[in-house]
Image (cartoon, rainbow, N blue to C red):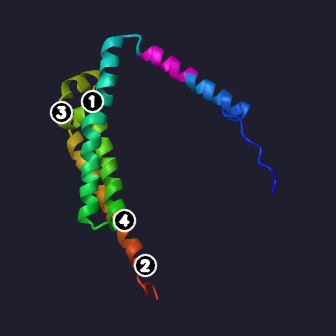
C-alpha cells in the first residue's frame, strides 16, 4: 500500500494567502464598523449572540423536536417543513423592525420610501415558500409510487 503524504496543517501556500487576506479584510471591516459608536456596536453584537444562544436556539430546537415528534420521524415531511420555516424565520429576523413597523418613520426619512407592506410581503413570501415546498413534496411522492407515470 502506498504511503500517504501528510498535509501541512495550514494547507497549501495559496490557501494560507487566501486565509491571511480574509483575516485582513475582516480586520479592516471591523475597524471601519467600530469607528463610530464602538461601545454600542459591541454591546449590540454581544447581546445578539447571547439572545441567539440563550433564547432563540432553545426555542427553534424545541420546535424542531416537536415537529419530528408530530410527524413520527418521517424525514421527508420534516425536511419539507424545516426549510421554508427556516427561511421564513431568517427573513423575519432580518426584517423584524420593518415588519413590526417599529422604525417606519426612520426608514422613510433615510430612504424616502414607504415602510408600509413589509408584514404583508413577508406573509406572502412565507406562504409561497410553504406552497413551493408542498408542490415539491407532492411531486416527489408522486414519483415514488409504484406504477406512477406508466
Q: Earlier in the sequence, mark 3 or mark 2?
A: 3
- Give the residue drawn at x 52%, y 18%: 27
Crowding at label 2, few (<14), some or many (≥20) Cα neighbours within 10 Å? few
Crowding at label 1, few (<14), some or many (≥20) Cα neighbours within 10 Å? few
Q: Report helix, strand or loop for mark 3.
A: loop
Residue 36 coordinates in the image, percent (x, y): 37, 10
Q: Which residues are magenta?
A: 24-33
Is 72 above or below relative to 96? below
Per the model, the C-alpha gap separating discs 4 and 1 is 43 Å
Q: Report helix, strand or loop for mark 1.
A: loop
Q: Main secondary structure of the magenta part?
A: helix
Q: Earlier in the sequence, mark 4 or mark 3?
A: 4
**Which mark, by number, is residue 101?**
3
Residue 124 visible from this viewpoint:
no
Per the model, the C-alpha gap separating discs 3 and 1 is 13 Å
In this figure, which residue is indicated by the disc labeled 2?
A: 144
In this figure, which residue is indicated by the disc labeled 4?
A: 75
Amino acid at each position: 500500500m502506498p504511503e500517504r503524504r501528510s498535509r501541512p496543517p495550514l494547507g497549501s501556500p495559496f490557501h494560507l494567502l487566501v486565509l491571511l487576506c480574509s483575516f485582513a479584510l475582516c480586520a479592516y471591516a471591523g475597524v471601519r464598523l467600530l469607528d463610530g459608536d464602538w461601545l454600542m456596536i459591541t454591546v449590540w453584537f454581544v447581546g445578539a449572540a447571547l439572545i441567539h444562544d440563550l433564547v432563540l436556539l432553545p426555542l427553534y430546537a424545541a420546535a424542531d423536536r416537536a415537529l419530528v415528534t408530530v410527524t413520527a420521524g418521517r424525514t421527508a415531511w420534516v425536511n419539507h417543513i424545516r426549510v421554508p420555516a427556516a427561511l421564513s424565520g431568517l427573513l423575519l429576523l432580518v426584517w423584524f423592525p420593518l415588519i413590526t413597523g417599529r422604525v417606519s418613520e426612520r426608514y422613510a426619512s433615510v430612504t424616502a420610501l414607504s415602510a408600509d407592506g413589509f408584514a404583508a410581503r413577508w406573509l406572502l413570501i412565507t406562504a409561497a415558500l410553504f406552497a413551493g415546498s408542498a408542490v415539491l413534496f407532492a411531486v416527489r411522492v408522486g414519483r415514488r409510487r409504484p406504477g406512477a407515470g406508466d
